[in-house]
Structure formats: C-alpha cells, structure tokens
Image (tube, rainbow, N blue to C red):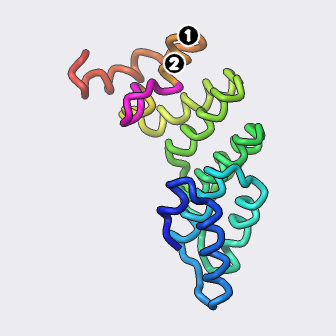
C-alpha cells in the first residue's frame, strides 16, 4: 500500500488497496499500518482506524510510536481526550513528544486548556529542544503551546525555556 494515498486526501484509495492486499494474500507490515491509520485520521474514520489498530498483532505487527500517534489523533477527533491521555500514559514503550503534541492539538481544538497545559508540559519534558513545540511547525504556524502561553493560560519555567533559547542564540 502506498502511504502517499493517506497523505494526499485519498483515504478511500488507501483503504481499497489495503483490502486488495489482504485478498491477494499479502501480509501488511509496519509501514502499511502507518499509512492505513494515517488515512483513517485524515478522513475521520475513527472506528475503522481503531479497528485496524487492534488487528495489527494478528498480522504480527507490533505498534510503534507512529501507530500510537495516529490512535491519539483518532481519539482526539471525537473528543476522547482522557482516553488519549490514558493511552499515552499506559504505553508499553516510552512515549515520544509527538504523542503529547498530538494530544495538545486535540486539546486546543476542544478548548481543554487544563489537559492542553499538561500535554505541552509532558512534551517539553521529553524534548525541551523541540522547535515545533516551542515556536511553530516547519510551515511557520505558531505552536499550540506557544499560543497558550501567549494567551496567558500557563507559563513555562525559565529553566525549561533557557536551553532552547540558548540553542537558537536568543538568550
């Protein structure tokens, strides 16, 4: 299955290819499931995405950070923010900042400032040098945590900001 389908708004195509793969006896792998779950996220196919995630072990595929990030996004799309948080905190692998950023994004959309604050703090504690979290993404969009800080919802201790500011030559 080509992950490009998932990233270019062709979720239906990605799902059709996946089903065809299975009919032809092909075994999906780690990357196949990343593309499949990503397609479900982009199309808003929450239940279907969760179903595919749950079937991964039957194909011998252990979920990784990319898969969990998709599930956090899926849960966030339907407002299940507490479930997404519980998933991150119960992972059998060490959570990456991307999981908390995904939850933070969903919190911003849902207006859940308290959980958004927690998600931002967790992401920064994992990766304090994450420029996407601190300043914005590669497209120049202002980050959710920066926006919340600016709006006065919470402030990061200077000790957390200083390493980043030093690294970019601001401090």
Specify the farthest residue to the bottom. Answer: 25
Name the one closer to the observer, 108 or 13: 13
| Residue 107, position as x, y percentages in the image | 66, 30
Disc assigned to residue 72: none
C-alpha span from label 2 to label 1: 6 Å
Q: Quadrant of residue 85?
A: top right
Chain part drawn in magenta: 135-144
| Residue 154, position as x, y percentages in the image | 57, 14
Q: Can residue 95 be seen by looking at this rendering?
A: yes
Name the one closer to the observer, 126 or 43: 43
Which residue is painted at 60% across and 33% down in the image?
Answer: 104
Q: Main secondary structure of the magenta part?
A: loop
**Above or below: residue 110 compared with residue 91:** above
Q: Was residue 137 drawn as part of the magenta stretch in this picture?
A: yes
**Above or below: residue 1 compared with residue 67:** below
Q: Can residue 130 be seen by looking at this rendering?
A: no
Which residue is painted at 55% across and 49% down in the image?
Answer: 95
Q: Residues within 10 Å of mark 2 (few under 14, many from 20)?
A: some
Circles 2 and 1, Cβ within 8 Å, touching? The answer is yes
Name the one closer to the observer, 31 or 164: 31
Circle 1 sits on which residue? 151
Circle 2 sits on which residue? 147
């Amino acid at each position: 299955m080509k992950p490009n389908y998932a990233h270019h708004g062709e979720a239906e195509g990605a799902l059709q290819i996946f089903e065809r793969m299975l009919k032809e006896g092909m075994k999906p792998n780690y990357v196949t499931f990343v593309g499949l779950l990503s397609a479900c996220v982009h199309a808003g196919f929450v239940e279907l995405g969760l179903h595919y995630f749950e079937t991964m072990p039957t194909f011998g595929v252990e979920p990784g950070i990319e898969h969990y990030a998709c599930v956090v996004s899926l849960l966030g799309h339907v407002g299940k923010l507490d479930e997404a948080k519980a998933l991150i905190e119960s992972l059998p692998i060490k959570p990456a900042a991307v999981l908390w950023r995904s939850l933070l994004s969903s919190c911003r959309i849902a207006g859940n400032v308290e959980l958004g604050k927690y998600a931002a703090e967790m992401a920064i504690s994992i990766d304090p040098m994450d420029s996407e979290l601190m300043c914005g993404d590669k497209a120049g969009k202002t980050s959710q945590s920066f926006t919340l800080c600016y709006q006065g919802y919470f402030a990061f201790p200077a000790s957390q900001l200083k390493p980043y500011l030093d690294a970019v030559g601001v401090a």
